[in-house]
Image (cartoon, rainbow, N blue to C red):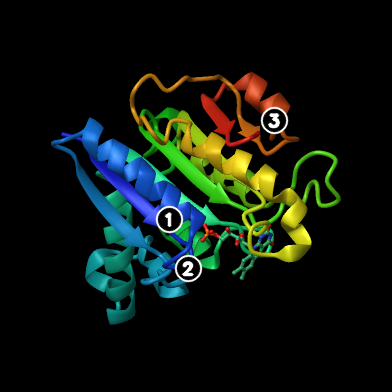
Amino acid sequence: MSNLLHVDASLAQEGSTSRSLAATFIEAWSTAHPEGTATYRDLALTPPPHLDWATLSAGFTPLEQHTPEQSEGVKLREELITELETADELLLSLPMYNYSVPSTFKAWVDQVILVGRTVRQPPEESVLTGRRVTVIATQGGSYAVGIPKEGWDHQLPFIAHVLESLGATDVELVRVEMTLAPVNPALAGFTELYERSRAAGAGSGLSHPGRGRPRQPVVTAPGAPGRAAPVRPRRAARRTRPCRSVGLA
Ligand SMILES: Cc1cc2nc3c(=O)[nH]c(=O)nc-3n(C[C@H](O)[C@H](O)[C@H](O)COP(=O)(O)O)c2cc1C
């Protein structure tokens, strides 16, 4: 029996592209895994707290010496980490906010990255090794090669690096760009780019999760429409990470 952990982060409960594509994924996943279970975490509705000193220091304080603050902090951290450890598969759906990930997602990352437990040496012993990971990342604009804000995307590269440090070796990044085009008249000329980007995302592994998803030994990040640019070509060449990026028109 397969267990899927789905982490959602968009502030928008309605009209959200990442939530809508995640729903497409979940529907297909449930069909493919009739016996499967899903654990859902909505970071917008229940934001995890920032990692604080009490919680951090609890990691190197004997259990019997924990203060009430340490015990409280550890409880939630343990819950979040256990959700990750018991997941066979992970779905992350999240928008770009101010060139990066939602702060709630960063808080979640700080809670679940625990060296010696979720991040291990060798990296293959880390929590996500051997687990399928799908990322749906939405962006109001575009950060493709040649666009004025090329290089401003601190969302997908950050996510890719976090997943790599958690040992993920099977990652699919689905990027949908220009989501603001249909609602912002100034971006109306990019509506077709948005539609193509969304259709490419919806038509990728999202519709048939776990069934013959291609694996490519390359770490990718947003590039120009029609191509994917490597995040760190030298490192990727050294440690081939099966991680591909789709959603590019
Ligand atoms: C607070 C906030 C900050 C945003 N910052 C950016 C940004 O820096 N770059 C960008 O391309 N879009 C930005 N957007 C637009 C969102 O990424 C876009 O609307 C996205 O589709 C929202 O996600 P969702 O549709 O998956 O809910 C921002 C939106 C909000 C609400």
Disc 1 vs disc 2: Cβ atoms closer than 8 Å?
yes
Mark 1 or mark 2, earlier in chain = 2
The residue that disc 2 covers is 12
The amino acid at mark 2 is Ala
Point out residue 33 in the picture as x, y percentages from the top left corner. Answer: 21, 33
The image quadrant in which ligand 1 is located: bottom right
Q: Viewed as shown, does residue 218 lie left or right of 75?
A: right
Mark-to-mark CA distance, 1 and 3: 27 Å
Q: Residue at 48% of width from left, 60% of height from top?
A: 16
Q: Earlier in the sequence, mark 2 or mark 3?
A: 2
Select label 1 or label 3 by which is in front.
Answer: 1
Q: Which residue is mark 3?
A: 230
Query: Dot 3 lies on which element?
Result: strand
Foreground pick, 70 / 132: 132
Q: Is residue 53 above or below residue 141?
A: below
Instruction: Judge from the rendering whether residue 76 lies leftward or rightward of residue 157; answer left or right.
Output: left
Q: Is residue 122 visible?
A: no
Compared with 106, 228 (above or below) is above
Position of 81 with respect to 215 (left or right) is: left
The three-letter amino acid code for the residue at tag 3 is: Pro
Residue 105 coordinates in the image, percent (x, y):
49, 60
Residue 19 circle label:
1
